[in-house]
Image (cartoon, rainbow, N blue to C red):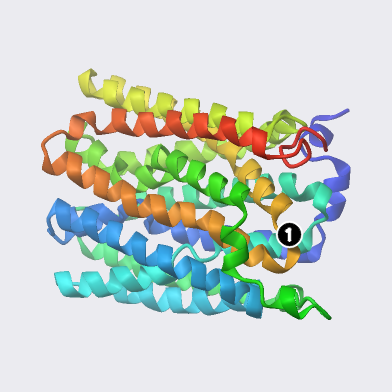
C-alpha cells in the first residue's frame, strides 16, 4: 500500500466530488481571510490605537459574549433557511464590518465595530459543519472533518504569515490596509459558497408537526450534548480561546519578543497541522474519541507549561522552546478536530443539526468570553507571569472531563465501532 493510499484512502478520494471540492475551496479562502487578522485583535487595540490593555481584553470578552448569544440565533436560522444562505449573508456583512473596523479611531467606534464583528465573526463554523454533513456519507464524516480542519489551519497559518510580513507597529496604516484586504478576501469566499446553493437548503421533516416544532428545548434536554459542551468549554479555556485572548500580549509584553514572532509561531502551528493531520486521522480511526480528547488536554497543558518556563530563558532559547511547544499543541489540534464534530453529529437528529452544531460552537463563544477576562485579571493584578500555568490547569481539567464522557456514549458514538 503506497503512502497516498494510507493517508487518503481511495474511497474518500472518490467521495471528494465537485461540490465537496468547492466547499473545501470556500473554507480555505474564508479561513485565509480570518488568519490575516485573527491574532492581532488585542495588539491592534492596545499597541496600535493605544487603548489600555484592560479595555482591549474586556472588549474581546464582551464581543465574545455577544457572539455567544448570536450563535443560538444563527443555529436556528441555519435549520430554517439552510446553511448556504447563512454563509452568504454573514460573509457579505462580515466584509462590511471588517472595512469599518479598519477605520476605528475612538473607544466608542471600537465598541461598535467589535460588537458587529462578534455577531458575524465565527458564524461559518456551525453552518459549515452542517453543510459538510450534507456533502459526505456518514462513513467519511470523521475523515472529512479532519481534512477540513487541515485546510482551515493551513489557510489561517498562511494568512498569519502574510500579516506578519505586512504589519508594522511603527506604521499603523499597515494594520488598516490589512483589515480592508481581509474584507475583500471574505467576499471571494462568499462567491464560492454561492455555487453550493442547491446543496444547502433547509431539511424539512414532513408529516410530523410535533417534530417540526422542535427547537432549542430539545437540544438542551440532551444530557450527553450538554456534558460535551461543558467539557469542551473547559478544554477551550486551555486551548484556542486563550491563544486568541492573551498569547500575543504575553509574547510581546512578558517574553519581550517582536510582534513578528507571533505570526511565525502561528505559522508553525498550522504547518504542523497540515503535515500531521492525515497521519492523525489514521491514528484515531477505531479508537475511543473521548480518550483521544483526554490526550489533547495533556498536550495542550504541556505547551502552556513551556510558555511559563520560557520566562527564565534567553531570547533565542525561549523562541526555540515555544516553537517546539506550539508544534506539540498543534498535534493536539489534529487529534481534536475530527473527533469533536464527529461526536456531535453522531448524536444529532438530522432536522436539528444546525442547532447541535451551533451548541458545539457555543464552546468557542463561552470560552472566548471567559478567557480574555481571565487574562485581564492576571494582568491587572500584576500576576501575568503566572497566567500560562492557570491555562494549563484548564487544559488538564478538560481532558479529565472528556474521559468521564466515555460512559455516556455508545461504542459507536465513541468511535470504537466504525
Question: Residue 392: which quarter of the image?
Answer: top left
Q: Residue at x 24, y 61 (%)?
A: 59
Q: Which residue is mark 1?
A: 133
Q: Position of residue 117 (x, y in %)?
A: 37, 69
Question: Residue 379: which quarter of the image?
Answer: top left
Q: Position of residue 37 (x, y in %)?
A: 37, 58
Residue sitting nearer the eye, 149 or 83: 83
Q: Residue at x 58, y 30 (%)?
A: 403
Q: Quadrant of the C terminus?
A: top right
Q: Residue at x 82, y 35 (%)?
A: 417
Residue sitting nearer the eye, 29 or 218: 218
Q: Position of residue 93 (x, y in %)?
A: 45, 79
Residue sitting nearer the eye, 42 or 71: 71
Query: Can residue 181 be seen?
Result: no
Q: Secondary structure at mark 1?
A: helix
Q: Is residue 263 left or right of residue 351?
A: left
Q: Residue at x 23, y 35 (%)?
A: 257
Amino acid at each position: 500500500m503506497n503512502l497516498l493510499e494510507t493517508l487518503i484512502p481511495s474511497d474518500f478520494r472518490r467521495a471528494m466530488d465537485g461540490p465537496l471540492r468547492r466547499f473545501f475551496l470556500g473554507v480555505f479562502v474564508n479561513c485565509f481571510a480570518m488568519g490575516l487578522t485573527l491574532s492581532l485583535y488585542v495588539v491592534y487595540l492596545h499597541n496600535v490605537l493605544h487603548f489600555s490593555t484592560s479595555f482591549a481584553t474586556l472588549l474581546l470578552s464582551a464581543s465574545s459574549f455577544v457572539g455567544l448569544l448570536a450563535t443560538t440565533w444563527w443555529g436556528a436560522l441555519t435549520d430554517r433557511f439552510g446553511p448556504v444562505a447563512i454563509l452568504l449573508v454573514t460573509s457579505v456583512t462580515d466584509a462590511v464590518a471588517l472595512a469599518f473596523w479598519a477605520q476605528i479611531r475612538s473607544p466608542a467606534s471600537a465598541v461598535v465595530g467589535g460588537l458587529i464583528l462578534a455577531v458575524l465573526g465565527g458564524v461559518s463554523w456551525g453552518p459549515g459543519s452542517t453543510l459538510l454533513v450534507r456533502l459526505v456519507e456518514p462513513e467519511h464524516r470523521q475523515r472529512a472533518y479532519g481534512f477540513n480542519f487541515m485546510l482551515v489551519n493551513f489557510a489561517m497559518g498562511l494568512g498569519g504569515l502574510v500579516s506578519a510580513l505586512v504589519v508594522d507597529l511603527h506604521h499603523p496604516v499597515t494594520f488598516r490596509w490589512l483589515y480592508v484586504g481581509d474584507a475583500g478576501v471574505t467576499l471571494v469566499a462568499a462567491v464560492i459558497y454561492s455555487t453550493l446553493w442547491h446543496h444547502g437548503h433547509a431539511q424539512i421533516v414532513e408529516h410530523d408537526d410535533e417534530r417540526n416544532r422542535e427547537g432549542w428545548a430539545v437540544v438542551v434536554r440532551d444530557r450527553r450534548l450538554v456534558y460535551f459542551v461543558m467539557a469542551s468549554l473547559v478544554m477551550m479555556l486551555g486551548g484556542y480561546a486563550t491563544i486568541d485572548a492573551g498569547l500575543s500580549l504575553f509574547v510581546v509584553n512578558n517574553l519581550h519578543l517582536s510582534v513578528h514572532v507571533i505570526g511565525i509561531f502561528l505559522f508553525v502551528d498550522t504547518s504542523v497541522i497540515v503535515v500531521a493531520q492525515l497521519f492523525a486521522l489514521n491514528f484515531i480511526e477505531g479508537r475511543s474519541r473521548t480518550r483521544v480528547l483526554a490526550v489533547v488536554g495533556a498536550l495542550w497543558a504541556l505547551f502552556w507549561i513551556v510558555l511559563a518556563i520560557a520566562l527564565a530563558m534567553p531570547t533565542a532559547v525561549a523562541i526555540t522552546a515555544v516553537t517546539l511547544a506550539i508544534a506539540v499543541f498543534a498535534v493536539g489540534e489534529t487529534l481534536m478536530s475530527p473527533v469533536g464534530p464527529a461526536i456531535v453529529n453522531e448524536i444529532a437528529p438530522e432536522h436539528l443539526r444546525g442547532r447541535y452544531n451551533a451548541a458545539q460552537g457555543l464552546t468557542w463563544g463561552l470560552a472566548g468570553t471567559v478567557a480574555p477576562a481571565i487574562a485581564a485579571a492576571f494582568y491587572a493584578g500584576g500576576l501575568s507571569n503566572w497566567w500560562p500555568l492557570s491555562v494549563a490547569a484548564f487544559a488538564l481539567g478538560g481532558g479529565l472531563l472528556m474521559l468521564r464522557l466515555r460512559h455516556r456514549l455508545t461504542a459507536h458514538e465513541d468511535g470504537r465501532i466504525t
